[in-house]
Image (cartoon, rainbow, N blue to C red):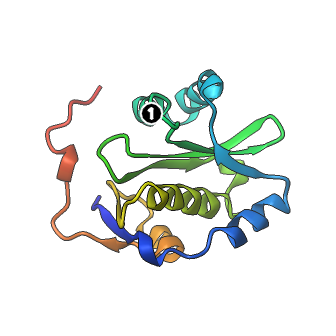
């Protein structure tokens, strides 16, 4: 899986994506530190491979985890700047909540947060759905980026 590059200075506007999900009662926002146990438990059960990265996102200040919620239900998350500085990801949306624009809103919210931190570019590491990121954020593949920073990584 190759890495992808996003030009943060050419991001699509965030508001339309937020308005779309808000119309369905979904809120996209930065997670709060006291929500860590809830988010970690959700990730542990559904996306265990990403548990360490989400945990690290809660150690950053401000928290580098953006969540999608409907009422008290967690629908998805996206993190940034955890594997390396200016890296986006991982990101996931609950299967039952997909195809409703939540993934798009999470991606754009997170990338806009990275732009606000002063980055001009973001790297999406080890991309799975390349077409999705290209469509949502104009991401382009980085040549010869596999395995990239993940080379030699210990695995359970």
Left or right: 27, with 153 as reference point: right
On the rendered image, what quadrant is the C terminus found in? top left
Q: Quadrant of residue 40?
A: top right
On the rendered image, what quadrant is the N terminus found in? bottom left
Residue at 76%, 61% (x, y): give it.
21
Return the residue at label 1. 60
Residue at 50%, 69% (x, y): give it.
132
Q: Secondary structure at mark 1?
A: loop
Q: How many marks?
A: 1
Q: Is residue 73 above or below residue 140?
A: above
The residue carrying pointer 1 sits among few (fewer than 14), some (14 to 19) or many (20 or more) residues within 10 Å by Cα, namely some
Residue at 45%, 62% (x, y): give it.
115
Measured from the top left, where is residue 129 in percent x and y? 45, 63
Residue at 40%, 59% (x, y): give it.
118
Measured from the top left, where is residue 62 in percent x and y? 52, 37
Measured from the top left, where is residue 9 in percent x and y? 43, 74
Left or right: 113, with 82 as reference point: right
Left or right: 44, with 60 as reference point: right
Q: Is residue 116 above or below residue 132?
A: above
Q: Is residue 1 above or below residue 95?
A: below
Measured from the top left, where is residue 61 in percent x and y? 48, 34
Left or right: 53, with 143 as reference point: right
Q: Quadrant of residue 121?
A: bottom left
Q: Quadrant of residue 103?
A: bottom right
């Amino acid at each position: 899986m190759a890495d992808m590059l996003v030009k943060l200075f050419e991001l699509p506007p965030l508001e339309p994506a937020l308005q779309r999900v808000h119309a369905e009662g979904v809120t996209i926002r930065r997670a709060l530190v006291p929500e860590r146990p809830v988010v970690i438990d959700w990730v542990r059960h559904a996306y265990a491979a990403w548990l360490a990265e989400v945990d690290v996102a809660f150690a950053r200040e401000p928290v580098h985890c953006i969540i999608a919620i409907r009422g008290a239900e967690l629908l998805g998350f996206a993190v940034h700047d955890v594997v390396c500085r200016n890296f986006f990801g991982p990101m996931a949306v609950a299967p039952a909540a997909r195809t409703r624009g939540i993934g798009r809103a999470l991606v754009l919210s997170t990338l806009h947060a990275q732009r606000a931190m002063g980055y001009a570019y973001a790297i999406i590491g080890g991309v799975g759905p390349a077409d999705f990121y290209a469509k949502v954020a104009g991401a382009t593949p980085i040549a010869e980026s596999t395995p990239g920073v993940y080379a030699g990584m210990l695995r359970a």
